[in-house]
Amino acid sequence: MTSKTSFFSTRLWLATGAFYGMAAIILSSFTSHLPDSYFIGSGRDMARIADTILFIHSLALIAISILQKIWQPSVHLNIIGFAFNLGLWCFCGAVFYTAMTGLHSPVLPIAPIGGSTLIFAWLYLTIATFLIKDRNNN
């Protein structure tokens, strides 16, 4: 991976993590302060779960950015970052949508696909810790 690509991916995951952290705070505020009429019966609880997942994974994406600096730049970390990103959009997006409308995707089970993608990303990160070399210890 070139130095320019490494720089881009490091900044990409840092910016994405920061954006999701901000979004988690905003959505948490909405979840806490919107009237009950904006949510289906258990929608507020569903939205709180999505808030928590979004915030935790914002920190995970920031960690991916830091790992790009500590370890040798790696396509593994970029795949993990993209998996976290996709998983968050699918899972949190579907849960927030369902919490406020009561509707589910008529085509695909989006939230379970997103959750499975997040699990995959964590598993891949676990495996990648043994595949990626440190910058200092080749």
Image (tube, rainbow, N blue to C red):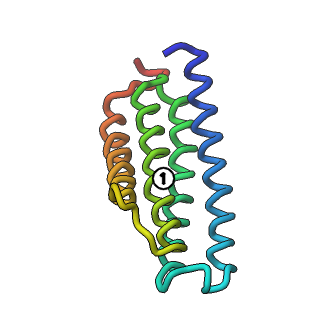
> At which x and y percent is residue 24?
62, 61
Residue topped by disc 1: 88
Amino acid residing under circle 1: Leu
Q: In this view, does 80 lie to the left or right of 14?
A: left
> At which x and y percent is residue 138?
40, 17
Can you name the residue that lies furthest to the front here?
Answer: 106
Residue 131 falls in image quadrant: top left
**Which residue is at 42% across, 25% downward?**
75
Q: Residues within 10 Å of mark 1 (few under 14, many from 20)?
A: many
Name the one closer to the observer, 19 or 99: 99
* Total count of labels: 1
Rendered position, 125 above or below 106? above
Rendered position, 98 above or below 41? above
Rendered position, 28 above or below 114? below
At mark 1, the secondary structure is: helix
**Which residue is at 65% across, 49% downward?**
19
> At which x and y percent is residue 53?
49, 61
Q: In this view, does 79 lie to the left or right of 93?
A: left
**Which residue is at 44% across, 33% downward?**
77
Q: Is residue 80 left or right of residue 17?
A: left
> At which x and y percent is residue 66?
56, 37
Rendered position, 125 above or below 3? below
**Which residue is at 53% across, 43% downward?**
63
